[in-house]
Image (cartoon, rainbow, N blue to C red):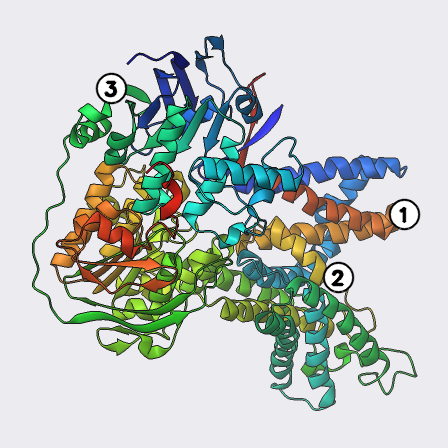
Amino acid sequence: MTRETLLDIRGISKSYPGVKANEDVSFSIGVGEVHALLGENGAGKSTLVKMIYGLVKPDEGTMQLRGGAYAPAEPSEARNLGVAMVFQHFSLFEALNVAENVALGMENPPPMRELAARIRAVSEEYGLPLDPSRMVGDLSAGERQRVEIIRCLLQDPKLLIMDEPTSVLTPQEVEILFRTLRQLSAEGTAILYISHKLEEIRALCDGATILRRGKVVGTCVPRETTAREMAELMVGATLTPPERRATAKGEIVLGVTDLSAASPIPFGTSLKNIGFTVARGEVLGIAGVAGNGQDELLLALSGELRTGADRIRINGHAAGDLGPSERRKAGLVAAPEDRYGHAAAPDMSLVENALLTGAIRRKLTRNGFIDWAATRSFADEIIETYDVRTPGNHVAARALSGGNLQKFLIGRELDQSPQVIVINQPTWGVDAAAAAAIRQAILNRAAEGAGVVVISQDLDELLEIADMFAVLNEGRLTKPRTVEGLTIDEIGLMMGGAHGMEVAHHAEA
Amino acid sequence: MLRLEKRPNPSKFWLYATPVVAVVMTMIVGGMLFAFMGKNPVEVIRTIFWDPMFGEFAFYLRGQLLVKAGPLILIAIGLSLGFRAGIWNIGAEGQYIMGAICGAAVGLAVYPTESRLIYPAMVIAGALGGWAWGMIPAILKTRFNTNEILVSLMLVYVAQTILAKASTGFLKNPEGMGFPGSRNFSSYPAAANPELVAGTGIHWGVVAAFAVAIVGWVLLSRHIIGFQIKLSGQAPRAARFHGVNPSRLVVLCMGISGALAGLAGLFEVTGPAGQITIDFNVGYGFTAIIVAFLGRLNPIGIVFAGILMALTYVGGEMAATNLGLPAAAIQVFQGMLLFFLLGVDVLTNFRIRTAILGVK
C-alpha cells in the first residue's frame, strides 16, 4: 500500500547543553498512516514530537508538510496547519467542566452552547462518549484523555500526535481508543503514536521508526515484527526476563484490615475498606488506573497518613498510628512514585538523600548527630550496587536522569534489610534495562524473605513479578488472587472495565 | 535577549559571591542616592564603611560594632533556622521586646537584692518571654493554619504597646521623678550586663551570640534536626516522608527564634540600653532579617553579616551627625542591601544565557 506523504522529516538534529536529543533523524508519515515512534525513555521521542508540534525549534534539518516547507514557530501555527497533539500529562483544569476546558484551548471559542453541541457530536461520531457539562475533577483518567482527544479533533487535524496515550487506560478503554484511532486513520488522519508498549504498536500501527539515543536505529512494519525484535532494537541489547525462584510462603509480615482514610490530596481518592495480607517472600501486585487511590495507599502504608493503630500490622504489631520513622524501625520501607520532591529532595546531594530514609535502619545517626562518613559510604554502596550513573555522591538528586535516580531511590530502600517493602510505580519513566534491573532487585529481596507490595500501572510488570494480584479501583481494593491463570480480560474487568463505556462502538461493532 | 536557565547543581561560587556583589551594588546605588541628596557619595560611603574601623574615632567605634552586632547575630541565627524550614518569623522585634520586659521584670522585682543568681534568672526569663511570644503565632499556625508572617508581625505592635505601658506604668522607676522608663540596671550590679573587657564592647550578649553561632553551625551541619530543617524548607513532602512532623517543626523553629530574640532583648536592656524605655528597641528584630539572608542563613555567614550590618549602623550614625544625613536614608541603604542580595541570589541557582537570535 503506498500512501501520499503527509509529513516528511529530513536530517533533524537538536542539542541541549550536554546532550544530543536528536541527531540526523529522518522519517516520513503517509496520509492516514498510523506511525509508531518507538524508543526508551530518553531516546529523544519527546523532543522530536515537540519540534513537530512547534514547541521546540530544531538546530538542523527540514520538515515538509504536504510538500510545503513546515517550520512552526509555535504550537498555534502547527495547529492551524492541521497538526494536533495529545500530551501524556493532561493540561486540564479540574474545577472547570469539559466544555470550558475545551474552550480554554481554542483561539476563538464559539458560544458555550454551540461548543457543547459540537463536543457531543464529535464524541459520538468517534465513539468517545463525553458529557460536556461534567466537571473534569470528577472524570476518570480515561475520560480526561477523551477531553484532550476531542479538543484536538475539533480542529479537524491532518496529523494527530499521541504521547503514551494508553498508560492511563484500562485494557477495555485501550480497545475503545484503538477503534477511534483506526476510524480516524480510515478517514485520512495520520497518527503519530509514541509508546514503548510493543504489543499495542503491533496491534495498531502501520509503520514504526525506532529511536535510540536520539538516532534512528531502524524502521519496521510492526505487524510483521515480533515484540522481542522491536525491544532489542530499542534497547540495543538482548533482554533477559527476570529470573525468579519460587519461595515458600512464610508468616504474614504485613496485614491491612478494613483500612479507610480520607485523601489528603485535593481531588484525591479516599481509601475505602482496604484489606490484604502479605507473607514473607510474597509479592503482591496492585494494579489500577492512575488516580484510583494509589498515592493515598502509599501514604497510608509509609506512615505519612495515619490511621487506626490496628488497621495496619507490621510483623503482627499494630502500626497504623505510627509515623514514617517508627514504621521504618518496625521493618517497613516505602518508595513513593514522585521522585522529585517526595521520594527525594531534588536540590540535596545523593548523600543527603541517602540519609533521608536510611538514617534509622542503617543507624546513620548517634544521639541525633549524623555520621556523615557512614552516610557517604551508604550512598556509595547504593551507587555501586545498583549501577547508578553519576559523577559522584555529591551531585544534587535533580541532576540525575529519571531512571538513574529511580535506581538510587529503590536501592536506598532495598539496602536497608527491610521486612516489608512498599513501592509505587517502581519503573515509571525508567528505561528497559534499568527497569529489568530494578525488578530483579525487588525479586531478590522477596527471595530473601521480605514481603513486597508493588503498586503499578504497568500490567506486564505486575504479571512478571507478582505472586498475588489485586486492583485498586476508586479507592477500593479487589480481593487479591494468584497471578497464575489470570487473563488480561479478567484483569480488565477487575479494573472496572471501561467505566461503563463499553457501548461506545456499538454502531460499528 | 537575556534568559535564565536553571543550573543542574547550585553554584558554590555564586553562593558566596552574591553577598559581596550585593554589597558593592548597594554602595553604588546608595552612593547615587546620597549624590541626589547633595552629599558627596564617596565621603558618605567612606564614613559608613571605613571610618568606624580605621577612622579617627575607631578606638571607640570598633567596640560599638560588637555592641550592635551581638543582638543582630543572636536574633538572625534563630530566624535563619525557621527561614531554612520555610517558617517565616517576621516578628522577632516583638519577641525581642517581650524578652527584655520579662527579663527586666524579674530583676526589678527583687531590687535591690544582691545575689549571683539574679542575672541567670533574668536571662532565663528573657528567653522564656521571647519564646512565649513566638509560641503565639506557632500555635495559631499549627492549630488554625493561620499565616505566621502576619500574626508574628502584628504581635510586634502589641509588644510595643505593652512596652509603652511597662515604661510608663508597671516597670516605671519609682524614684524616676515621673519620667518614663525603668530603673537603670547600670546602678544595680546584680542585674547588669556590663562590658566584660573594657573598650571592646564585648558583653554577655556578644559572648552568647558567638556561642549560639557555633551551636547553630553544629546543629545545621551535623545534627539530624538541622537536616530536617533544611529538608522541610527544600522539599516539604520529602520531609514528611522522612518522618518530620511539620507542626512540631513550626513549634521548634518559632520557639528557638523567639527565645534567642528574647535573650537579645534582655542583654540589650540590661547592658547597652540600660533600662526599659518606651523606645529602647531600635529595630534589631527587623534588621536581623536582612542579616540572616545576607549571611546565607548560615550561622558563620551571619556572624560576618551581623558585623557588616553593625557597620552600617555605626557608620550611618556617624554620617547622620557629621554629614547631616537623615536617619531614613540609612534605613533605605540597609533595605537596598537586602534587595540587591535577593536579586543577585538568582545567580546561585540559575545562569544567564544570552539567547541566540531567532531561537526561543
Of badges 2 and 1, the one in the foreground is 2
Which of pointers 2 and 1 lies earlier in the amino acid sequence? 2
* Dot 3 alpha-carbon crowd within 10 angstroms: few under 14, some 14 to 19, many 20 or more: some
- Disc 2: host chain: B
Q: Report if residue A371 is visible in the image.
A: no
- Disc 1: host chain: B
Tell which of B35 and B351 is nearer to you.
Answer: B351
Q: Are marks 2 and 1 in contact (CB under 8 Å)?
A: no
Q: Amino acid at mark 3?
A: Gly
**Residue A493 screen position, x and y as percent:** 28, 54
| Residue identifier under label 3 | A218
- For this orientation, the residue located farthest to the front is A507
Instruction: State whether discs 1 and 3 lie on one chain.
Output: no
| Residue identifier under label 1 | B324
- Disc 3: host chain: A
Q: Amino acid at mark 2?
A: Gly
| Distance CA(mark 3)–CA(mark 2) | 70 Å
How many marks overall? 3
Q: Is residue A74 left or right of residue A200?
A: right
| Distance CA(mark 2)–CA(mark 1) | 21 Å
| Residue identifier under label 2 | B283
